[in-house]
Amino acid sequence: MAHDRIHAKKPTHDLDRWETGVIEDVFERDGHCVVVVDDDGEAVELRVTLAIRDLFVRRLDLAEGDSPVGSRVWYRKRGGN
């Protein structure tokens, strides 16, 4: 399965290949993490591994225990749902 890409910080390379959005929801489905991102009014579902979820959430500027909902992220849609 091809997974999507997501970053908590602005990428430093290939900026034209990345989209930005705001996290609307984060949940687990079928052993993967689904991140729903609002990209200018359009909901985009991104599927990543649980390890990638932990990594990008750790890199967000959040207080301990805060939800990532409302955080801005950079992403690339690659996989199927």
Image (tube, rainbow, N blue to C red):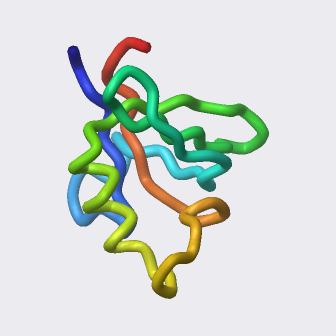
Left or right: where 23 falls relative to 11: right
Using the image as rendered, state which of residue 10 and residue 62 is in the foreground: 62
Q: Residue furthest bottom?
A: 63
- Image quarter where the C terminus lies is top left
Residue 2 found in image quarter: top left
Could you tell me which residue is drawn at 21 percent across and 15 percent down?
1
Left or right: where 7 falls relative to 39: left
Could you tell me which residue is drawn at 50 percent across and 41 percent down?
35
Give above or below for 28 relative to 55.
above
Residue 69 found in image quarter: bottom right
Could you tell me which residue is drawn at 43 percent across and 53 percent down?
74
Give above or below for 68 relative to 80.
below
Give above or below for 5 relative to 22.
above
Give above or below for 13 relative to 30.
below
The percent position of residue 21, horizontal first and vertical second, equals 58, 51
Could you tell me which residue is drawn at 33 percent across and 51 percent down?
53
Using the image as rendered, state which of residue 23 and residue 66 is in the foreground: 66
Q: How many numbered circles does the render carry?
A: 0
The percent position of residue 44, horizontal first and vertical second, equals 59, 31
Residue 72 found in image quarter: bottom right
The percent position of residue 20, horizontal first and vertical second, equals 52, 51
The percent position of residue 46, horizontal first and vertical second, equals 45, 33
